[in-house]
C-alpha cells in the first residue's frame, strides 16, 4: 500500500488519496499487540516509517532532501533537533475522522507543497495543518507541488 500511496497520489496531484491510505495503513496494520506489525519488521524500517508518518511526513527517496507529507496523527509534536533547533508539527482539529489536510502553513506562510525540505526542518520552525473529514482536492494538486521524482528528469 505504501508504494501505491506515494507514487499514485502525492506524485500525481492527488495528495488527499495518500492521506486517506496512509492513515488507513497506520490504523489497521500497526497495533500494540504481539502480532501488531504487518509482515517482516525489516530491521526497524517498518517502525521508522510509522514514526515518521505519525508526525505527518516520511522520507521516500534517500538523498533527495525531501519528506513527503501524509496525515499526522498528533495534534502537536515537537522535535528537538541535534543542532539545537526545534521543529513543531501542528495539526489543528486532528482526530480519528479528520484525516485530510485542508490547508497547510510553513512558519506562518501558506504552503501547498506535498513535501517538506530537510533544510526547513533543520532550520527549526513550525508546519501547521488544518485537518478536515473531507478531502481538499485542490491542496497540493499543482505539478509544482509534487515531491522529487526521477521520472521528471526523463521528460
Image (tube, grey):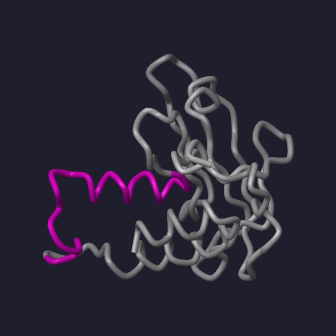
Is 34 covered by the magenta stretch?
A: no
State the residue at coordinates (70%, 65%): 13
In the depicted view, which residue is nearer to us: 78 or 118?
118
- Give coordinates of residue 40: x percent, y percent: 15, 66
Residue 133 location, quadrant: bottom right
Instruction: Describe residue 35's horizontal placement relative to residue 19 as left or right.
Output: left
Q: Vertically, is 62 above or below 149?
A: above
- Give coordinates of residue 120: x percent, y percent: 64, 30
Instruction: Describe residue 57's horizontal placement relative to residue 33 as left or right.
Output: right
In the depicted view, which residue is nearer to us: 96 or 41?
41
- Most prominent secondary structure in the magenta stretch? helix
State the residue at coordinates (51%, 77%): 21
- Give coordinates of residue 125: x percent, y percent: 68, 32
Stretch of the chain drawn in magenta: 35-57
State the residue at coordinates (63%, 82%): 97
State the residue at coordinates (31%, 73%): 30
- Give coordinates of residue 101: x percent, y percent: 71, 66
Residue 33 location, quadrant: bottom left
Furthest-front residue in this view: 155
In the depicted view, which residue is nearer to us: 30 or 117?
117
Is 43 covered by the magenta stretch?
A: yes
The quarter of the image holding the N terminus is: bottom left
Instruction: Describe residue 151's horizontal placement relative to residue 101 as left or right.
Output: left
Amino acid at each position: 500500500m505504501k508504494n501505491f500511496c506515494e507514487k499514485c497520489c502525492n506524485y500525481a496531484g492527488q495528495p488527499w488519496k495518500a492521506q486517506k491510505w496512509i492513515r488507513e495503513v497506520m490504523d489497521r496494520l500497526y497495533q500494540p499487540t504481539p502480532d501488531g506489525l504487518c509482515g517482516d519488521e525489516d530491521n526497524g524500517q517498518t517502525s521508522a516509517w510509522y514514526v515518521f508518518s505519525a508526525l505527518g511526513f516520511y522520507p521516500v527517496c534517500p538523498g533527495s532532501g525531501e519528506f513527503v507529507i501524509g496525515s499526522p496523527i498528533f495534534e502537536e509534536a515537537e522535535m528537538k533537533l541535534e543542532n539545537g533547533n526545534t521543529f513543531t508539527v501542528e495539526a489543528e482539529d486532528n482526530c480519528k475522522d479528520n484525516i485530510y489536510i485542508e490547508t497547510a502553513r510553513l512558519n506562518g506562510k501558506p504552503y501547498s507543497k506535498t513535501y517538506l525540505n530537510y533544510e526547513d526542518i533543520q532550520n527549526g520552525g513550525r508546519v501547521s495543518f488544518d485537518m478536515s473529514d473531507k478531502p481538499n482536492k485542490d491542496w497540493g494538486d499543482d505539478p509544482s507541488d509534487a515531491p522529487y521524482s526521477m521520472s521528471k528528469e526523463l521528460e
